Amino acid sequence: MRPTRLLFALVLALGFHSFSAAAPASKPNILVILADDLGWGELGCQGFTKQIPTPQIDSIAKNGVRFTQGYVSGPYCSPTRAGFMTGRYQTRFGHEFNPGPAEHAVENFGLPLEEKTIGNRLKEAGYATGWIGKSHLGYKPEFHPLKRGFDEFFGFLGGAHSYFDPKADAANPILRGTEVVDKLDYTTDAFGREAVDFIERHHSAPWFCYLSFNAVHSPMEATKKYEDRFPDVQDPRRKAFCGMLSAMDDAVGQVLAKLREHNLEDNTLIFFFSDNGGPTPSTTSGNGPLRGFKSSTWEGGIRVPFLMQWRGTLPAGRIEDRPVIQLDILPTALAAAGVEAQPDWRLDGVNLLPFLGRDDKISLPHETLFWRFGRQIALRQGDWKIVKGQGMPGVDEASRQEKVTTEGVELYNLKQDVGETKNLAASEPQKLKELTVAWETINAGMVDARWQSMRMKALRAAGKGKGKKKKAE
């Protein structure tokens, strides 16, 4: 056993809940792959459908750990990304909502500059840092990835983009660094190639690659090559979705092949997750048995595919049922890199490595997980969850109530009822009170949203009208 692996084994044997800053003699590379709007049930390794083969993404689960209860801290693109980037609940710094398209975004939209990113922290640790794909964390120059700890950037700053035309949105073009890209074949293919190229150029030293696909987010666009793989799918939207996911799987495969080419698999920590659940009004992305969808605090909006691989260090083929969240990626990556998290960073995520080295599976990475998204809320403790989600009274309607409350929350036991079909609030009043108090206590440490969602603006505007109803976009 190599000295690095031996020391890691000793750390786990002692039951430490942090990875010693001095542990890694050779810093592992870090690869974070983020899918966009991919539902919990779509990947082959999740076991709900085999319609779209995803062998390359599934190989991360085969060679590593698949978390059956992986979460994100927001049911929407930008909030989830802000949480991932910082390792902190985005509601701690007001990044609660999406901003809308670039031409309509609020003036102050962007990941607050006082928040350090995973790119900042790994760059300070000596890593080459590259960001490929979608940002959605600010349009102004000060929020550009090159100003947030990343050496290289190829992608776009907004929330969605044409897969074929780099200049389809003049306010949100495809960029290399800060320069507009003139030609593009297909974003998914291009982002995969860029990641391969980044690894090729930096393979001899520690690197961090954040590969943020816009697949399978709308617009629903796939090349004929990928759609032709699904001749039996007749629905045009589903056919396009199938092609888009298949293309992403191919791109992931190319990146993994580059790791193997340079014998980097044993020295690369890989994460794969989605920014929120599906479906959306555009996509057909499925959540299996989960209730809800993107933009909701039901399980279907916040529980996502979540995979992790570090060959030779983490167990292969492990199915992990303890809840984790995307906030854990930053502290886990830093621990692997030998960076000791400081208390004044006030991270909400935890280092997952010690938990994955245990056989007893008794201790939990998180006793409690928290969500707030406008008037929607949720909190999970153990198998229990309270939720106020889309479709419940007072959530979607415009009203004078500016502050979210726990009034009317429902209670579910996710171990017995993963589909959130049986509200136990009336039969379990003590448990309901316990979780409600916990949510209110945590929420007291959060701040108000820095900007409102476009939907809430529209609802409030409708509510101020002269008795007329106005449909929000």
Image (spheres, grey):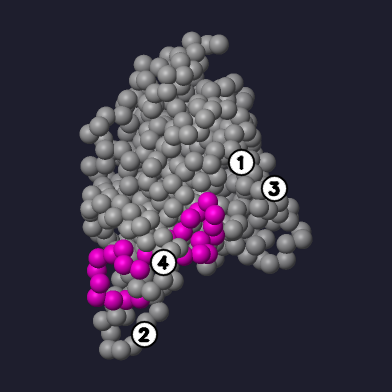
Percent position of residue 86, x then y = 33, 41
Which circle's residue, 4 or 2, is located before the other in the chain? Answer: 4
Amino acid type, residue under disc 1 in the picture: Ile
Whether the residues at callouts 4 and 3 have beta carbons within 8 Å, the answer is: no
From the image, tell me which residue sits under label 4: 426
Name the mark nearer the viewer: 1 or 4.
4
Which circle's residue, 1 or 4, is located before the other in the chain? Answer: 1
Residue positioned 33% across, 65% down in the render = 375
Residue positioned 40% across, 41% down in the render = 366
From the image, tell me which residue sits under label 1: 57
What segment is highlighted magenta in the picture? Answer: 396-423
From the image, tell me which residue sits under label 2: 469
Percent position of residue 336, x then y = 43, 25
Percent position of residue 74, x then y = 40, 53
The answer to if 32 sits in the magenta stretch is no
Question: Mark 4 and mark 3: span between their CA atoms?
Answer: 43 Å
Question: Mark 2 and mark 1: span between their CA atoms?
Answer: 45 Å
Question: Mark 3 and mark 1: span between their CA atoms?
Answer: 9 Å
Percent position of residue 136, x then y = 39, 52
Asked where in the image residue 257 lies, by quadrant, the reply is top right
> Quick one: label 1, few (<14), some, or many (20+) residues within 10 Å?
many
Q: In this view, does 316 lie above or below 275?
A: above
Amino acid type, residue under disc 4 in the picture: Ala
From the image, tell me which residue sits under label 3: 53
In the picture, the disc for residue 430 is none
Residue positioned 35% across, 57% down in the render = 430
Circle 2: element type = loop
